[in-house]
Amino acid sequence: MLVLSRHRDESIIIGDDIVITVVDIRGDKVRLGIAAPIEISVHRQEVYEAIQRENRQASRLEPQDARQIERLNQPLRREVRRSRPEPN
């Protein structure tokens, strides 16, 4: 692991297009600003791990579970009431 020291408003560059800037330091917390291309996902570690758990769980769905989910996503059928012609 590379360990770097930075002061407020100083940055770290990763590759050609990711910039991490120290935005604020308060006590034992550091606020970071991250500029990265839209196609690169940026998550806090705990969020990333939760996404991975959800993906693993979803990949283990049984076929009957998938069919139930598919049924839930189908559009509802609506009965169309035909209006009666108004008397003249």
Image: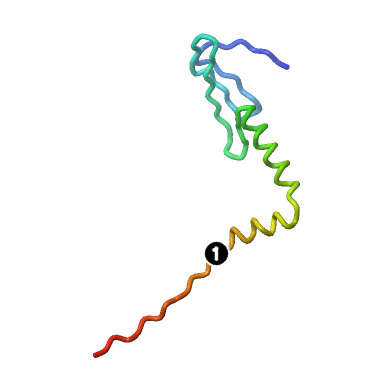
Q: Secondary structure at mark 1?
A: loop
Give the residue displayed 58% in from the left and 25% down from the top: 19
Residue at point 52%, 19% (across, down): 31
Looking at the image, residue 30 lies above or below residue 49:
above
Q: Position of residue 18 (x, y in %)?
A: 60, 28
- At horizontal 74% and vertical 46% (from top left) the residue drawn is 59
Q: Report the residue marked by disc 1.
A: 75
**Coloring scheme used:** rainbow
- Residue at 65% in and 34% down: 50
Quadrant in the picture for the C terminus: bottom left
Task: Find residue 3 and report its horizontal and vertical position in percent.
Answer: 68, 13
Determine which quarter of the picture holds residue 64: bottom right
Say if 71 sits above or below 85 in the image: above
Seen in the image, is 88 located left or right of residue 62?
A: left
Q: Residues within 10 Å of mark 1 (few under 14, many from 20)?
A: few
Farthest residue, direction bottom: 88
Residue 8 location, x and y as percent? 50, 13
Quadrant of image for the N terminus? top right
Q: Position of residue 25 (x, y in %)?
A: 50, 12
| Amino acid, disc 1 | Pro
- Asked if 30 appears above or below 70 in the picture, the reply is above
Q: Count every numbered label the image shows and give the total.
A: 1
Q: Is residue 66 above or below residue 33?
A: below
Q: Residue at the far left: name it.
A: 88
Q: Nearer the viewer, residue 27 or 50?
A: 50
